[in-house]
Image: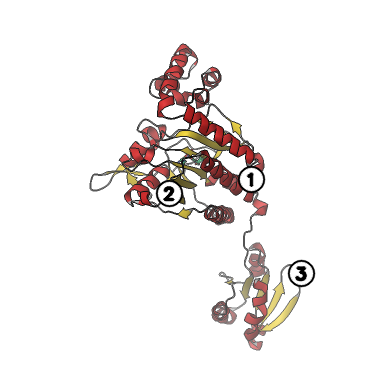
Amino acid sequence: MITTVRGVRDILPAEMPGWRLLEQTARQIFSSYGYQELRTPIFEKTELFARAVGATSDIVEKEMYTFADRGGDSLSLRPEGTASVVRAFIENNLQRTLPWAIYYMGPMFRYERPQKGRFRQFHQMGCELFGAEGPLADAEMMAMVLRFLRRIGVESSLTLEINSLGCSQCREPYRGQLLAFLQTRFESLCEHCRQRLQRNPLRILDCKGEGCRAVARQAPFMKDHLCGACGEHFQGLTTTLTDLQLPFAINPLMVRGLDYYNRTAFEVTTTALGTQNAVAAGGRYDGLVAEMGGVQTPAIGFAMGMERLALLLDAARVDASPPLLYLVAVGAAAGQRGVLLAEQWRDGGLPVVLDPLGGSMKAQLKRADRAGARFVLILGERELAEQAVLMKNMVDGVQQVLGWDAVVAQCSGLLT
Ligand code: HAM
């Protein structure tokens, strides 16, 4: 038997009501804040991600699905959405029509070690906003994320964490200080962090290793070394979040794993999923559009992991939309007629599920029950002769005989 690739899974029909709830709620809420949908390709030139996400980031160095196509070009499956959105923004000359507010949803690919809530093909829903510079936009975006999480009923186990990563001006001197500090604690760092100390000392702050975490807690924090403008931005953000009555925690150790961020970084974390605790994450990337060849444009965005959200959903709250009418046709002649009648009733606007396996009445009724059908229409030999069906309410057991011609008129009322 050929199985799926490790870290990749089917989303089975039983899970789909939850996924649809996530998608529908996201569309509703994002569009109510003025966002429009964008669909970008699943694969892009490798160079796009190397430049946008960062050539030395874990994602680009170790996690991308990269391949040469038949023409010899290096392509990669997208590990995230922001790089493609920035490319689309520049390539389609959208810089003249700011603000540009877009949302996207779809599969992303990272060669990570699979575990609960972490997959190699996973799905994100995200938003990107181009043109807004001030902290009001940051706070409003977080309010939108929290509204979404509230609407789907999962906010109780969640915390909004924020930090500032500074800008090119204040981060360089801070990086020097941090590096100097970490060098004095070299012996306490894990092997991986020792290796990346020179290249990317900031990432050491969010290493999960025990020793590294103890060192990180004593390290100088970026938020205490912000330049005037970055400090004001962060202050503006915390004030607005307070005005909006959105609870938040400042996490000075949050650094994010993608290189394009500056100033605001945020994550919504949960206590319910073990180590893969971020359900939403994002931040500002004011320099990225210019770095990718566009006109300098401030931007901010976030993405949420759909698998993680689906794990948090309360299954009982999700409507599985069971069949309204389930047609049970018993015997060959009734089966023959049942196909025609079902089509005729569907022409009349009714949703009708015709039992596809046939067989005894008992077996078909059992399947109707399992499917959660609300009404069963029984077509046996007697009903066939009378050009009628026996309609049974599966909740209270009440039955009535309906002529074939009366089914549409009688059942249309059940649709509301
Ligand atoms: P990210 O933190 O890499 O950011 O991913 C965002 C979210 O995607 C995570 O918080 C998590 O919920 C989900 N996620 C990431 N990797 C996996 C995985 N292997 N399996 C399951 N879920 C996963 C970004 O991707 C940025 N593009 C977000 C952003 C948009 N920043 C600005 N705009």
Q: From mark 1 to mark 3, how far is it between C-alphas?
A: 34 Å
Residue tagged by mark 2?
2
For label 2, count other residues whose C-alpha is less than 10 Å away and answer few (under 14), some (14-19) or many (20+): few
Contact check, label 1 and label 3, Cβ < 8 Å: no
In-image side of 241 versus 129 (left or right): right
Contact check, label 2 and label 1, Cβ < 8 Å: no
For label 1, count other residues whose C-alpha is less than 10 Å away and answer few (under 14), some (14-19) or many (20+): some
Mark number displayed over residue 154: 1
Q: Which residue lies furthest to the left in this view?
A: 71
N-terminal-most mark, 3 or 2? 2
In-image side of 399 versus 248 (left or right): right
Amino acid type for the residue under numbered disc 2 = Ile
Near-viewer residue (53 or 186): 53
Element type at mark 1:
loop
Amino acid type for the residue under numbered disc 1 = Val
Q: From mark 2 to mark 1, how far is it between C-alphas?
A: 36 Å
Q: Pinpoint residue 214: horizontal percent, then vertical percent.
A: 56, 18
For label 3, count other residues whose C-alpha is less than 10 Å away and answer few (under 14), some (14-19) or many (20+): few
Mark number displayed over residue 396: 3
Look at discs 3 and 2 and give the one toward the viewer: 3
**In which quadrant is the C terminus drawn?**
bottom right
